[in-house]
Amino acid sequence: MKHVLTYLLLLCIAFNGTLLAQSTVISGSVKDKSNGEPMIGVTIVVKGTTIGTVTDFEGNYNLQVPQDAQVLQYSFIGFKQQEIALSGQKTINVMMESDSENIDEVVVTGYGIQKKGTYTGSVEVVSAEKIEQVPVASFDQALQGRAPGVVSVGSSGRPGAAATVRIRGVSSINAGNDPLYIMDGIPITAGQFSALNQNDIENVSILKDATATSLYGSRASNGVIVITTKRGKSEGRTTIQYRGQYGLNTIARDNFNMMNTAQKIQYEEELGIKNYTPEEKLALLKTNTNWFDVVLRDAFTQSHELSARGGNEKTRFYMSGGYYFQEGIQYRSDFERFTYRLNLDNSISDKANLGVNLSFGYEKNNNTVSGGAASTNVYNPIFAARLLNPYLAPTKPDGSYNNEGFPFANPIEQIMLNENKNNTLKIVGGVFFDVELIKNLTFKTNLGVDFYDYNSYSFLHPDSEWGRGYNGLINEGFRRNFRLTPTNTLRYQFNLAEKHDFNVLAGQEIISNTNRGFSVGARNIPTDKLRVLNVASEIDSWAGDGSDYTVASFFGNMAYSYNYKYLADLSIRRDGSSRFGVNNRWGTFWSAGLGWNIQEEEFVKNMGWIDQLKLRASIGETGNYNIGNYEHQSLFRYTSYIIESAAFYAQAANEDLTWERKFKANVALDMAFLRKYRAKVDFYSETTKDMLFFVPRSQTTGLGGRLENIGEMNNKGFEVELDGQIIQRGDFGFHLNANLSYNLNRVTKLYNDLEEIDQGNTKITLDQPLGTFYMARWAGVDESTGKGLWYTADGDVTDTYSDAHRVLHEGKSYLPPLTGGFTGTFSYKNLQLSAFFSWMADKWLINNTRFFTESHGMFASYNQSVDMLDYWKQPGDKAVHPHPTYQDNEFDTRLLENASFLRLKNLTISYNLNKDFVKKSMFFNSCRVYAQGQNLLTWTGYKGIDPEFYGVTEANMYPHVRTITVGIDLGF
């Protein structure tokens, strides 16, 4: 039954205006543009009046309008409003186009699509316009703040770097927390999105609760992100579009205020590190180097894309080719990408279809050391720039690199002499075929491939400080991953008595993944002109590995709707994985969801201001198998001892190892009202059981421990989303979308009845969030002695640090409980201004960089923060820092900072040229010009380089960039 609710609700306004004596009758039909079916209950009104009607059950209408009427408005929930000017015509036929931002949008769910109005699951849809043309290389970075319950944090500003994505918190300690990514029905590897063109994406569906995720079974514990790419259209014509943009990248935030030459000389003399003569001091003062300006630069970015989209009733196609280049703000850190996509749909007959989805991406990266274990290594240019004194010059007067007086290698020289690069070929493709076997029974088969080749190359120049000890060093590596996923489904849809709608799905799927890699290093390079392995005279290292895993699955789903009023979804999946022991290789996962479209009830239908009022709830269980491929097996490792091959026992078997299981419960209310506002709130609780946890063993066994199913964790919270056209006055409008999420993480069970596990700066504690900080409390400076002070665990004050002073800082975790974003869009005629903000609250980080730049004497000979000038000098001083000679440098709460932030993530101003004017060119049919800024402003109390970092400790990360671009979109 189509659109019955809206039809009944709108009848009350069908003829609520008084017609003028002189009038004209306009008639016509309204159809759905996507499928050509008549639309029931579409509202047609004379603009600026209350004169109107609605379409009947055949999609037809008749409307008597005043002779002075100028415009008719056509509107329907879930479709874009249309305005048609009256110019004497008596018949107007309209094709309504779906509005992806509205309440009854189509969402891609487990192995199919459904209307949100009949779906009981928790799904967020991020439409194409929110992520298109955003100047980031990896689309997952564009998700930040776009959907409630989704955290997407870029821990590096390096070009092409992936984001860390979490859906409804962290649910595992030792197994993976990444969501499952599906693109056009094909599972793809997390963290490898830089080789994909985000402008090819039609929308992203984020599946969160049990109903939405359980059909993916053992892979869906951390949520599912379903990517749908653009497809052809059956309008009989081809549209061609060019998109291009150019821009400038600069550091987004640099609030580290390091000492200049005069300050550093003063600091060194006060501490007695050096005693300069007047002549030496005068010579040093001639140089005042900001080393950040040396290792960083202003960089440019550009992108170009040409796409074609079209087809007819038989064949539809979408194809695109793209080029993207981003110069890194660190020298020798560039990203370049070439992409190609082809989506082809062909109707073989009225009952059979054949299609192809194919994506090629080739990317090239130049890299400098920037994070991980190297974050506090002077090989990292950011760290080197912090520590080098300002009176050191990077180059000599003749332009050559300077190394005189340097405590370590000149970083800019090392960057320019040495190479570190890689390239990746990424192919994601699939072939599908579907056929209607009998009426309403459809069989579909899909063969998907996720493939990549990765090559790495590094060269340490024999003349460089880093490569001199090897007399030149070359390392090359190669890795190939191939995943094959055949999927077969049967879908049966039927209706009983025009009230009971059934949609039944049964399916089978196999995942087969193979990974191989090797690397080799060689030293003693005779000349830097020949940078290949075969010129080296000595092998330095070699390695090689391979692994495989398979998953076999059987699943089923039934969706039921009674008169669009009462809804039910039931799912079950049976998975077997090679990653688990033979005793527990198979697992069963399930879900049940219920929905109630309250607006269909008689007691609500008379409330004309309510467009939608829907209550939904779900429960179910999903799994997590994101561990290594052989964790359940008894393993030996092979190495060499002296010069002989050797093997040693490295891992104990656990044939009972099995999935983590997450029990999910969700209750939600969706509401739309006054035809321009909508709101949604979800309450959820998710408990991880049989948690995959590395349980340590006594070292006398020769093993560190093994992975076991033990421990529990809970995430619960709520999500709120608001959306509405706040102002619409003639040609001026303001639209607001905002979302907020609150997630409370709790560890509820550990192994061996433990109540806590010390992890250094954090502690896993029962009934506390994961990542809760465990540190000694800094008590300031003793005014009489200048010594650093700490609180003991009992609250007393002492001038001697001890790990025994550490206490748990409840409520302070690196996992932010509050996250969200909001977008305000102003429009006036063809001009639009959009501002998107993202934020996180109650997020905490250890600022590890300050351990070195405010070192309390340990690194006093290196450059220090200006804040270090405020140190204790004599009794009675109320100083921030103790006297540096005490070297009171510890990981205490002095370094623990509130990293909550509000960031103006994107600001875009655009103008769509008048179509009639553009068409006069006889070549173009649309033109949009725009300028945008990414990461323009950040408000935070965090003193580090950027608060947008995922982890416990931040140190010398590659800075996020502020990008200003101008662009043009041309339609042919």
Image (cartoon, rainbow, N blue to C red):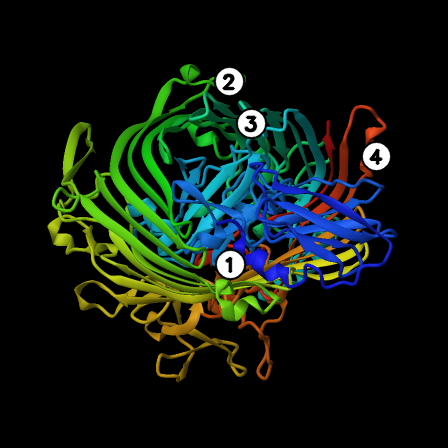
Q: CA distance from mark 1 to mark 3?
A: 31 Å
Residue drawn at point x = 30 percent, y = 57 percent? 620
Amino acid, disc 1: Pro
CB-based contact (under 8 Å), mark 1 and mark 2: no
Q: CA distance from mark 4 to mark 2?
A: 64 Å
Report the residue marked by disc 3: 339
In the image, which is nearer the foreground, mark 1 or mark 3? 1
SS of the residue under disc 1:
loop
Q: How many other residues sit within 10 Å of disc 1, few (<14), some (14-19) or many (≥20)?
A: many
Give the answer, above or below, for where 405 lies relative to 238.
below
Report the residue marked by disc 2: 527
Q: Earlier in the sequence, mark 4 or mark 3?
A: 3
Q: CA distance from mark 1 to mark 4?
A: 40 Å
Q: Earlier in the sequence, mark 1 or mark 4?
A: 1
In the image, which is nearer the foreground, mark 4 or mark 3? 4
Q: Earlier in the sequence, mark 4 or mark 2?
A: 2
